[in-house]
Image (tube, helix red, strand yellow):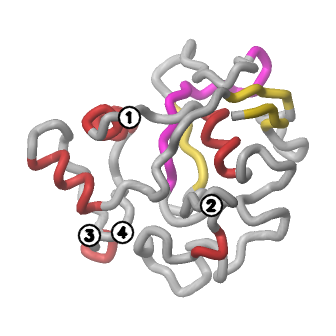
Amino acid sequence: GGKFTMGASDQSDAQPHQVTVKSFQMAKTLVTNKQYKACVAVGACAAAASAGATFDGDDQPVVNVDWNQAKAFSTWAGGRLPSESEWEYAARSAGKDQKYPWGNEDATCGNAVISGCGYNATAPVCSKTAGNTSQGLCDMAGNAWEWVEDGYHGSYNGAPTDGSAWEDSGSSRVYRGGSW
């Protein structure tokens, strides 16, 4: 945990503000299809909607799950969804003043699974280690979108500054990172 500046001055709905995040743990990888299918097999998770065979590899991240499915998996696995503040703190390599897990350089085919790099689907998790955070978290930029606990708000005005989730809105939820 620690203090950091969350947001970006070039984003009208995400203006920078100071946040203090308590210590927390986060899984190193995105949830894989194999992991998610184990949750489905015991009846704790509803099956993901099919995205097509190119997205179905055991080591590829699960896609086409809604927020409720992601939350059910997290609970089944003994965890929880991170708050948006925790997610951003982790994606910035423990709150460093940088735009991406690897620094301020734009995403490339060498550090993120993104379109335009020969991908027509997700790639196996952790396949772009040059894009890992300082703590070793994989795919915080690129590959699959990641759900967080927070409800969607049109700006950070009134957002919690203690790193907790901001949940006092409608049914729209926040997802971060990703490409698919």
Which sits earlier in the primary sequence, circle 3 or circle 2?
Answer: 3
* Quadrant housing residue 163: top right
In three-dimensional space, the C-alpha distance between marks 4 and 3, rounded to whole angstroms, equals 6 Å
User: Residue 90: horizontal and vertical position, in percent?
Assistant: 65, 46
Name the image quarter holding the N terminus.
top right
Amino acid under label 4?
Answer: Gln
Based on the displayed image, in which of its 4 quarters is residue 165 positioned? top right
When the figure is inspected, residue 82 is found, relative to residue 53, above or below; the finding is above
Cα gap from disc 1 to disc 2, whole angstroms: 22 Å
Q: CA distance from mark 1 to mark 3?
A: 21 Å
Amino acid bearing label 1: Gly
Q: Name which residue type carries label 2.
A: Ala
Using the image, determine if residue 52 lies above or below residue 101.
below
State which region is magenta: 145-158
Q: Nearer the viewer, mark 1 or mark 3?
A: 1
Secondary structure of the residue carrying tag 1 is loop
Label 3 belongs to which residue?
58
